[in-house]
Amino acid sequence: MQRLLRVEGVTKSFSEAEDERRVLENLDLNVSSGELVLITGSSGSGKSTLLNIVSGIDLPTVGSVYLDDNCITEMGETERAKFRLRNIGFVFQFFNLIPTLTVGENLALPLELLGYNRQQNARHIEESLAKVELSSRLSTFPDRLSGGEQQRVAIARALIHRPRLVLADEPTGNLDVTTGSKILALFHELIASSEISVLMVTHSKEAEPFADRILDLVDYRLETRS
């Protein structure tokens, strides 16, 4: 498989009063096209920090991040934001749907930011909602949806612009085990036929059967689960 993501020698430290707190140290990571990689680790181990650095939301203290041959860590803030919008999708624990927008409007937002026209938007939204079995919820506001339905909308939004990479931060952490397992199966089904890569942070044992690799973040670095 073609390598999509490269994280090379990433160290991240934060200043706290007069002290320096190191979260990641000389960390390396490769993810291939179409690969689903799980990252596990204790709370505070740096998992979410790593996702923020991969996406360009945050920068490492030292090290580089590449998506294909594009060095995200060398881009300016505006360039990183544009690159992230085009190439990366996000799925979060608390769904992060905009409560004042309908399901359809939530899905339309990334397309509008990318400059798609209304006819293109309508087609993509219709197709995306059909894939997550929520076609009848187009005009519904998020607070009228169950947690599982909200996460299905969030997955549809993350995939609607066909990103190269999806970053998922505890995507089933706010759901019961049964609903979470259904969401993971749906997520895997949607990405299995594509070349989309997924980097997922999770404590969920139910996610492990879907993973191509499982990595544990221990002592600032990633270790491959044997």
Image (cartoon, rainbow, N blue to C red):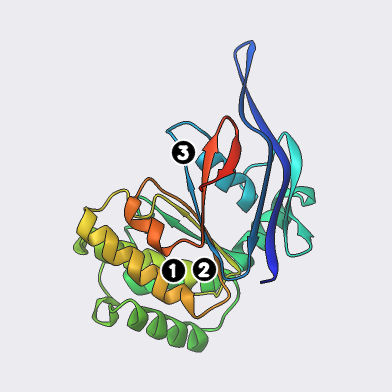
> Is residue 20 in view from this perspective?
yes
Q: Earlier in the sequence, mark 1 or mark 2?
A: 2
- Give the mark toward the camera: 2 or 3: 3
Q: Going 50% across and 33% down the picture, which residue do you hit? A: 45
User: SS for tag 2?
Assistant: helix
Q: Earlier in the sequence, mark 2 or mark 3?
A: 3
Residue 74, disc: none
Q: Position of residue 85 (x, y in %)?
A: 60, 63
The residue carrying pointer 2 sits among few (fewer than 14), some (14 to 19) or many (20 or more) residues within 10 Å by Cα, namely some
Contact? badges 1 and 2 (CB < 8 Å): yes
Residue pointed to by mark 3:
41
Q: Earlier in the sequence, mark 3 or mark 1?
A: 3
- Could you tell me which quadrant the N terminus lies in? bottom right
Residue 157, disc: 1
Residue pointed to by mark 2:
110
User: SS for tag 1?
Assistant: helix
